[in-house]
Image (tube, rainbow, N blue to C red):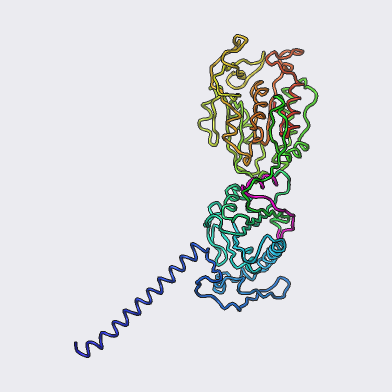
Amino acid sequence: MEPGAAAAGKPGLLKNVFVRLFLFGVLIVLCRFAYVVTVTGESCELGDFCFFSLPENLNFVIANTGGTAIAVRNEAVPSILAGSTKPDLYTSKDWIKAVHFYSAVFQDLMSQGFLSRKAKSLCVETPAGHDVYALRESGVKGAVGVFKKASRPLVIPGEVHRLPFADNSFDFVFSAGGRLEKSPKPADFAAEIVRTLKPEGFAVVHVGARDTYSFHSFIELFNCSKLVTSRDIDGFDSSMPKIREMVLRKDCGESEGFGHRVENPGGSAGNKCSVPGHKMELIRKAEPLIEIEPLKPWITLKKNIQNVKYLPTMADISFKKRYAYVDVGARSYGSSIGSWFKKQYPKQNKTFEVFAIEADKTFHDQYKLKKGVTLLPYAAWVRNETLSFEINGDPGEKVKDKGRGMGRIQPANPANGGFNGEVDRIQGFDFANWLKNTFSEKDFVVMKMDVEGTEFDLIPRLFETGAICLIDEVFLECHYNRWQRCCPGERSSKYEKSYGQCLDLFASLRQSGVLVHQWW
């Protein structure tokens, strides 16, 4: 090879070497970037291989709300904050006020041993990251925030119902701003907190739970967790002027219950059901029962619904997994679902699933096009069996629904030999078992029961099986030999029970912690 050709080849060789080194460096940077984003949540902890870090002795000075200044160590602020596109946010009075509030909260938690500077910490549902900033200012270097929309450098993107972290990842999880109670899926929210929390780790949640019912509903959301302490504190803005701070520890051991055992009204002495004691507080606030038998029950009982104190008007129902209305003996859609529940029942902006239980096939077709309504075309009963279904109205009674009388169920071969009215064969199902297979104590369940006397069979069965514990509020029509509208001075022979027996049933339910109302 000639000397000139050799000299010309050297620059080309060096160029190729430099290009390859450059590409290798770019590859390393990209791999590191992917690691930081997907594994560490965009946070660089001590000992990590981080690029573009600022000197550890560099301080940021931000204006205080009182006109003075506070120095924030670089360890409390991510290194890329200097290049943030939102410098005004981090120096605004609202930002500083929020950071000071959360800093005070975290200092208290540290003094009580619930938080340490070495704790790997997560703030969930934090739009701007005030709490993340305050954690880092307090010396918790591993803090990171998550929200559906990222707010870099403090908050990474992620859905609270599916957090982008592995199980048992954090020593400390924090949720502020009452975001758990505002969530459409609070149970999933709580489950993700517990999932990502390490055993013996602490979760601290700020909520607006101001009554005993919502307090216990909140606790029930957190599986494998125990309430350590709670306190009421003043908020820092008008959105939450009062805050209840809940501190929970992840502990998958057996937790203590809040319930008490109550007797089964109308059943044997050995049958018991555990009804939470805090429901007695709601019973004391409920409207009084009508002690004296009304001479015109069709008027008195209908007017009484105006005096009803609904559970959602007495307590916060936000901390529930599902919301359901179960209409037992629904008849037509407009009978109570469309005319009463949809229009009058206070739902606190929650979406309720509706279950219509109606054995009379005359009404089945009108439910086919009703969205959000599940029809169970059977008779609620104490076991699964074939039943006789009698259609026979009271004398002189006007029935609006296509001239149909009220349906009553009996065993397929009744002892009295049959009925005088129209009789069909229908399928009965174990209503108590259906409740237990469909709902849990984390759900909010409202029930209306109008079953033409079968309540004296169904209610004891609900207590016997414990299914009554799944129902939060009951609207019950009790059927007795009441005075007839058509024939003054005469009682209905359709039912054997007396008003006194119905009153005893209502009183027993309330004494057992069941919020029951008299329906018409």
Instruction: Give the farthest residue toward the front.
Output: 253
Front residue of this view, candidates 179 and 433: 433
- Which residues are the magenta region? 215-237
Q: Quadrant of residue 19?
A: bottom left
Vertically, is 166 above or below 370? below
Point out the image quarter for the N terminus. Answer: bottom left
Could you tell me which residue is drawn at 47 percent across and 65 percent down?
35
Residue drawn at 60 percent across, 17 percent down: 410
| Rendering coords of residue 379 (x, y %) | 57, 24
Residue 10 quadrant = bottom left
Residue 249 sits inside the magenta stretch? no
Residue 115 visible within the image: yes
Q: Is residue 126 visible?
A: no
How far across and how far down the image is residue 349, in percent? 63, 44
Where does the image place residue 451, in percent across and percent down from the top left? 64, 23
Q: In the image shown, does 404 or 354 lie closer to the viewer?
A: 354
**Residue reaching furthest right?**
292
Which residue sits at x=69%, y=21%? 479
Residue 146 coordinates in the image, percent (x, y): 56, 59
In magenta segment, residue 234: yes
